[in-house]
Amino acid sequence: MGNVTKQASTRFSIVKRSKGQSTVEKASYISRSILVSEYDGQTYRPKYHEDLVHSEITLPPNAPKEYADRAILWNAVELSEKGQKSQLARMLKASLPNEWSYELAEKVVRDYVQRNFVDKGMCADWAIHDSENDKGQRNLHIHVLLTMRPLAENGEWGAKQKKIYDLDKNGEKIPVIDKKTGQQKVDKRNRKQWKCHTADSTDWNSKENAKMWRKDLADTINATNEQLGIAVHWEHRSFKEQGIDREPTIHIGAVANALERKGIQTERGNINREIIKNNMLLEQAKEMLMLAKQELHSAQYAKIKSTAVSVKNEVMEMIAKVRERKGRLDLPIVSGKHLRKIADRTALQSADNAEKFITTRKIDSFESLAKFTADREQKYQQLETVHLSKGQKLNRLKELSKMYALFAPIQATYKESQSLKGLAKMKYDRAHKDSLSKYPELKERMQSLLQNGEKITPKQWKAEIQSLQSEYDSIGKEQTKTATELAYAEVIGYNKKNLERELQNESRQQNRQQGRRKRREEEI
């Protein structure tokens, strides 16, 4: 079966002062942190923080170190722009595969941001969010906020545009001629004027760059998916560019999105609803497949549940209450230590899966859940220590083998040269000059990798690599299994606290309402 194709959602935009926008406000939004703008004096407080997976600032080498503080960085950007129509920053918002773990997402995004933006000289403030819609569908995505002015070597902001003199066919500057006098014009300081034009100091605004960045993100996602065995191909091109007769949805915007969440229909929301309706036929096969999987999943769980001993279980009761209220469990995105390692986070939200976890591990109380967690945490730490040790040995042997593969043919050439004499040696050395010149350096590098008294044993290295790799992979699987158990425990523990908090809030609200009702009755 071929790969499923997914349309990549990648959107670039410009933060513009003419629209009343602020880079400090955008930085506050993506990092879910409180920031104060020195330009307009406003304090920006994000409404949400539960969906923040990770935030980070990545800087080019010539950027001032204090720019690692986003408040300093974006206030410096704001204060460097004097005009009321200034373009302040570039923003990128893009989806990531929901099948990825948070740890993998961080690693891939960090590399993508470094290669495409920071290496070109931009300062990048980026964050990963994992939001959830009202149907419980997760949306792992990134926000990247990028500077638009180049930085000079001394760390000062440079100009966005530069003056370029027009040249004639001989490469000489072309004078500006006064039509009345026929002489070259001069300015107020009596300096000669030459024909010129302005151009961007960098190529960052090029539309071709935007296409390249979109393609690179899709290529990066596809390469990572291929390594993970995820049969989903991400396509960066629009439906029109692909020649597909299918209409994409439009960007709805923050204001309309807020109204839609309140149940108020908007014009842009209605447009998207119509588009979605027209595209539904293309999704029917996928929906039917998902339904069949869900039915099989439910049947399997019903069989497991029917064999469980029916006893009072406070953990199961809590899960049942959350299921009744929300249909699924909430995720502790910010506080989830082991959750970050898990790819299938939707599975962790399933009440059925949580009940299976509790039943199969014979957990009958939150006290036994705490004990289970402590035991598994100790096991995970032990596995992590062994896994790290095996990995270090494996990497060293692989490095030795790789180095030997480079060194062996050069060493053979060197030995052959040493076995010859006179004219034959001169002819051989001349024919193998490049290889022989590399011998001293490669020999030194090879010896630096060998430990005290260690001999070069490529066959033994190969056998050890195969054995270690098998052990390393086996421990890794056990580590993943343990991390998944700990993630379930984290989710269940988080939902217990969350349910208690919600019930307390509801109780207080009911008490207040009863108090108000009682006072009204007394007044009557």
Image: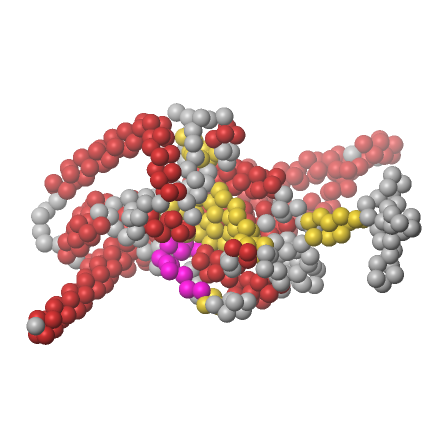
**x then y, percent, for residue 351:** 22, 47
Compared to 295, does 185 lie above or below? below
**In the displayed structure image, the side of residue 335 where residue 463 appears, left or right:** right
Picture quarter containing residue 406? Answer: top right
Q: Looking at the image, which is closer to me, 247 or 367?
A: 247
State the residue at coordinates (14%, 56%).
314
**x then y, percent, for residue 235:** 48, 34
State the residue at coordinates (87%, 32%).
423
**x then y, percent, for residue 355:** 19, 47
Residue 324 among those drawn in magenta: no
State the residue at coordinates (12%, 73%).
519
Q: Is residue 467 visible?
A: no
Q: Looking at the image, which is closer to me, 198 or 125?
A: 198
**In the displayed structure image, the side of residue 20 where residue 382 appears, left or right:** left
Bounds of the magenta segment: 44-58
State the residue at coordinates (60%, 57%).
86
Q: Is residue 32 visible?
A: yes
**x then y, percent, for residue 249:** 41, 37
Q: Residue furthest bottom?
A: 523
Q: Looking at the image, which is closer to me, 382 or 48?
A: 48
Q: How many marks?
A: 0
